Image (cartoon, rainbow, N blue to C red):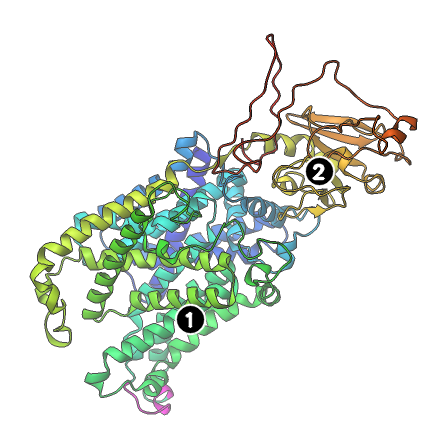
Amino acid sequence: MLSALFAGALIAGASLVCGQAVMALSGRERFSPVAPAAGLSVLLVVCGVAVKLPGHGTAAALAAGLVVAASVWVLVPRLGELGPVRVGAIAAALIAAAAVAIPFATSGRVGILGQGLVNDDMASHLLFTEWVDTREGPTPDLIEDGYPLGPHAVVSAVSKASGASLVQGFAGLTGAIVLLAALTAYGALGGVREWLRAPGATLAAVPYLGAAYLAQGAFKEPMLALALVGFALSLPALRECWRGYSPTIVSTFDDRGRRWMRGQALLALPGGVIAAGTIYNYSFPGLAWLALAAIAWALLTAWYERERREGMHLLDRLRWATPVIVAGVAIPVVAALPELIRIVSFAGFEAFSPSGAEGNTGFGNLRQPLNPLQSLGVWPSSEFRLSASNAGTPALAFYAGALLAALALAWGLGRAHARREAAMPAVFIAGVVGYLGALAVGTPYTSAKALAVLAPVVMLIALRGLLAAERLEDESAGEAEWWPPRPLRPVVRFGAPALAVAFIAAAAFSTLLPLRQPAVGPTDVADRLIDDFRPEVQGENVLFLGRDNFISWELLGAGDVFSPLLNHYDTEETPTLYRATPINAKFDWDNVPTETLADFDFVVTTSSAFNSEAPPEFQPAKRSGDFILWERAAPASVDRRTLLEPLFPGASVDCSQPAKAPLAGIAGTATVLPAAPAVGQVWEPRPSITNSSVASQELSLAPGRWEISMQFASTRE
């Protein structure tokens, strides 16, 4: 736990220092809520580039250290300008970090979030992170496809600097993201009563879908949400640049002077840095979110000023904002140059395409598309993948909670519009457009990610409207004289606080549900396989006869890892005598054709008695807990044939049947039990066992002592 805390503290501290240095260079000396997102973006870019250099992870750690040192050098002369330390901001950060630590506290270990039960994508993240540092073994498929590796480079660097394991490094990254998001949300809730600001920032940092994604080890969407909110908060500083006072392009160069233009261009530095970091976290889709937000903000701002300016004057505004636009585009473009080929390759990423060969193509680890109401923050289920009709809670509770959250969002949007606030509504518009785009041309998996990114924005808008310290009467003047809506005015004085209390209570309860008892996988099995088997199979192709989505990482350095079971985490599927299904089919030595087995000198199996006997040419080379590493000791058997065993460990043969009688004339061997076993019939109520169902089976046994064997294959016990 201490190593994970140290790793998280390093990431968060480095992000804050680098981010505030970016703000200082842009002319904003006081601590800014934009700094957390800007600083994390600096680390993503610096580590993402440096990890390509000799030394890889070590080079990334050194580069990050140099950037942090340079940032300290920038900040030291300006310490007096940072402003007072707000206790509420510290409280919000610590509460949010404590909330995201609940899964580790309840499980009693720092392990792999979401393993087995929810999401094994961490198998890929661990493989990618160690591969970018060691470059051992073949290049993982997704890396060849251009998958962005900025977060992995950061974890590699912090693991080198802190001595933490990769699992602990990712746990630290998770905590750092939430801590930084809480600080950003605290700044976004300016104008909220101070005693409500810290809990509000905590809830905005970890809304329901954000908590659900973090609890399954998915860090990229919360990181993109942090970037999106930070980017939004950087936009109001550009308002003067967007006024468009000059009618001609000539004034851009002659009337204002180079020094003025340089100062204006520096205002785009925070947003440009955040955009650059987004490329290294989420590639071009993340950049599209920021671009949509910037366009929406520009249009909203012009719309709000249209009456005073007698029109929107978009062309004049564009001319006046030329330095900011050029700088804002140039920064991410230059930062993306080392990743240009990979960005182009990523356009063909299979998760973006709804077509494919598998039945669940486009769903990933989902069971059905997510309900967009989940992004509103009130969803009383610990399992976000369940629909309202399939959850244990009555469906009415889900829709009543969603209605409550929708009212809170509508109230927040109304107050934002009354105050002529453009930044957060613009990001909300970008999020909605992003979700609709994913819904139209993407997959249920990508549209679910869009909802997770949108969730913190929704929460911030709702909380900002409900908890604002300004009196409602103060907003009923000038351009906002329609606010609050006239029919609501008789009840708004008491109705708004009641809505706030109900919404916050329901949202906080919903957030705690996915955090209180998530899947946190142990690391002891992986550690043993890494220590015992990995050195033995370096450069060798390995056949793996088991169920372990992390096996490619655990055996990193081997040539390729093959399995009869389709595995989406960089294993290769090998031919089989009969199909090994993901749920209940047995597969072991007898599942592999002789000619296929001849291609391997190393095989890893479980030590279960459920397995068939190994071919005589293989001998145990090493044992590690529940696994055995077999090594070829003789050439392959030329004429090894087995009986079909589709589900159970063995085959039933009645030689009195004409179809089976020829087997009696074959010179073969059979392993039999000395006493006939008592075998059940079928599981009730259905033979197909799932995570959400109960199955039972009755056995008729004679009096006496029996050995009970319940053999099963599962990704999580």
What kind of residue is marked 1? Ala
Q: Nearer the viewer, residue 323 or 405?
A: 405
Closest to the observer: 177 or 569? 569
- Which residue was labeled with disc 2? 544
Q: Nearer the viewer, residue 514 or 557?
A: 514
Indicate which disc residue 507 carries: none
Q: Is residue 102 left or right of residue 584?
A: left
> Which sits in the foreground, 520 or 333?
520
Nearer mark to the viewer, of 1 and 2: 2
Where's residue 268, x and y in %?
Answer: 38, 70
Quadrant assignment, res 546 = top right
| Residue placed furthest toward the top | 704
Is 503 rendered above or below residue 421? above
x, y percentage for residue 379? 33, 48
Taking the spot 30% from the left edge, 87% from the top edge, the residue there is 313
Amino acid type of the residue tagged 2 in the rendering: Phe
Residue 65 in sight:
yes
Residue 584: x and y, percent? 62, 37
Residue that label 1 marks: 291
Q: Secondary structure at mark 2?
A: strand
User: What residue span does the magenta drawing correspond to?
Assistant: 245-253
